[in-house]
Structures are given as C-alpha cells and as structure tokens.
Image (tube, grey):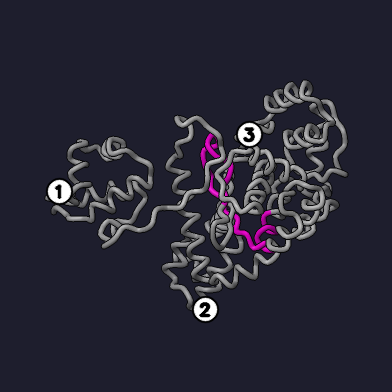
Amino acid sequence: MNTELKINPKLLKWAREDCEFSPAEIAGRIRVDLEEYLAWENTGTGLSLDDLVALSKVCRRQIAFFFLPSVPPKTRKPTDFRNLEPALAKLSEKTLLAIRRTVRFRDFLLQLHGAEYYQDKYSWITRYRESFAGRLDSEESVLWIRNLLDYPIEEQTADSGNPETSYKRWRNSVEHNLGIHVFQFALPQEEVQGFSYSDSFPYCITINNAYPATSRSFTLFHELGHILQSQSGLCKPHDIIFRREDTSTEYDCNSFAGSLLVPTKEVVSAKDKDTIFAYATRFKISSEVYLRRLFTLGLVSENEFFPLLDEIRKSVLPTKPHYLKSPVTRSINSRGEALFNSTLEAMNQRKVTYSLASDILGLKINYLSGL
C-alpha cells in the first residue's frame, strides 16, 4: 500500500507549465483522471510515491524538486525567430529539455568563473561593436571575425580535411578564441537547428546535432550573428531564403554565416548542381550554403536559384546517426571542451564536488576518478 504524500502544488504547476503541457496532456501521460490530477495541482495531496515517480519522469525533474519551499524562476527561453504558424511552433520535450540544460550549464559556469572573467573574455565584442555596429555582414566585419577565429582559408580548404573536422575546428575556435560556449544535443530536425543566449554571461550557442556537420557549421555562425547583435534566438535558418519584413533578422544572420564560411573573394560562379557541389566540398559546407552565396552576390538569378535549390535538396542523403562509444567522448561532444575542462579543473581543485561534476558532465563518478 502506497503512503500518500504532500508536495508543494505550486511546484507541480510550475513544472508542468515549464514543459508546456496542459493539465489534460500530463494527466494522460501518467494515466490518471484529469480531475484527480487537478486536485494534486490545487492541494498537493493525494499522490502516492508511484504517482510522484511518474510525474518526475514526465517533467524531467528529480523527486526532491516537488518538495522545495518556493517556486524557482521560469526557464529563460530565447526569442523564437522561426516564423512558424502557432500550431507548428510548439517546442517538443527534447528541445525544452535542451533549453533547460543549456540554462543550467550557463548558471553553473557563471558561478564557477564569475562575471569579471567573462567581462574580460568578451572585450573583443566591445571592439567589434564600436567598429562595425549595424554592419553585421559587411566584408570588413566578417574578415575581422575570421581573423579572430584564426582558421585561415588555406586550412579550411585543405584537401586533408572533412566537414566534421572543419566543424570541430570552428567550434573550438568559437569557444577558445571568442569565449562563447557551444553545446550540442540531438533534437527534432523539423523543429530547430540551433539557439543562442546573449542576455547575460556567459554567452552560448546550442546546435542540433541531428544535422550533418556542414549544416552545423552554418548554424554555428548564424547564431554567432545573433550574439553579435545582442540577441538570444531560437532558429531554423534553413527555412530563410529571401529578405522579408518579418524575417530580416534571420536573413542578416544567414548572410553573415555564409560570408564568414565563404568570403566574397573566394566565391567562384557556378550554374549547375555538380559544380556547386565541388566548390561546396572545397569549403566543407553544404551545396545549399554555396548556392545561397551565389544568389546573394548576384551570380545566380532568382529564376535560376529555385530550380537549383530544389535539385540540391532532392539529392541530399539522410543524416546518419552519430555513434560515440566512449561516455567521455559523448560528454565532450555535448558540452564542449571549455565546459568539460573547466568542470574537471574545478573538481580537482575541490571547488565543486564529485557529485556535482558527475551531474554536470553526465558521467558516473567512477569515470571522473580516472580523468
């Protein structure tokens, strides 16, 4: 026989709303009558331990969360720039969880390093804005950022590289040279490609790891474009093609990303799918990104663009899933080298406990002891 528990009902309602569930949806997921669930949310009584376990799994919260004395602040979500119909804009559980994890990583890093650390890290942004305010995709501003990232075009186009190694190089440069953390989670492809936070320290970018490396490189710099404009954004840049009043911000960030990956002086005209693919392969980007650059620079007309875009999209192969066997490798891939190394260093210096480090890195304590 299960003993009835008493929880904080405000926390139950908060957890449900944070997951964007209606009362009917959450009642259906844990298989209880709606009236019974609403009674829990009103009084916090009448739940069994089994009920609480079911709720904790659905809401992705620890059981202890429901006994906290006060309601925490709402999870800060980025501005939605996807320009979708309301029925399609609702975020899935996976994406909402990724947002929560990103916010938690940011809070942890700020507590670990402090605001002054990041103020110093981001001194380059002040210099950038003083020099290039309002000129996000100008050739001068793009080259300034490329120089800061220290990934010369000769290395980017070297035959020995591939899109995955190129993306890793870009990602590490953004983390180490710009001080912006880059996280990765596998999310629904039809929903989001990435999001970013620049409302407070530290700045960060989260990438949908379900996309191929060529797409992730483009998304990385699309989100960097938002950060350079002091914006926090939730984005699907793949869907933005032409400038419209309600998508001009996304268009500008796409233009910035394309210009950074393929500087103007490197663009060579092409009029067919195979030639476009050859040049895109050289830069470790997708054919679609190269086609967009051709269109932006007036090397492909609107009448030529759409048939080529359709042809390119039809030839794209499904993304193969990434199998990373080592738990440590998976942790670094998801959290980035900067967060991973900072956490290990803090643990070894006894600034954080093994338990907290284990939780942040998603690794069992026995793995940490050997690192």
Outermost residue, left side = 1
Q: Which mark is residue 210?
A: none
Q: Nearer the viewer, mark 3 or mark 2?
A: 3
Residue 223 pos. (x, y %) = 63, 48
Spatial distance from mark 3 to mark 2, Cα to Cα?
A: 52 Å
Given residues 338 and 50, the one toward you in this image is: 338
Which sits earlier in the primary sequence, circle 3 or circle 2?
A: 3
Quadrant in the rendering for residue 247: top right
Specify few, some or many for label 3: CA neighbours under 10 Å numbering under 14, 14-19, or 20 or more.
Answer: few
Q: Which mark is residue 245?
A: 3
Residue 166 pos. (x, y %) = 73, 50
Label 2, on which residue?
A: 349
Outermost residue, bottom side = 349
- Residue 174 is covered by the magenta coloring: yes
Judge whether 274 appears above or below 122 on screen: above
Look at 42% across and 52% down and name the residue there.
Answer: 75
Spatial distance from mark 3 to mark 1, Cα to Cα?
A: 52 Å
- Residue 75 is covered by the magenta coloring: no
Kind of residue sitting beneath label 2: Gln
Range of residues picked out in magenta: 171-196
Spatial distance from mark 1 to mark 2, Cα to Cα?
A: 45 Å
Given residues 9 and 365, the one toward you in this image is: 9
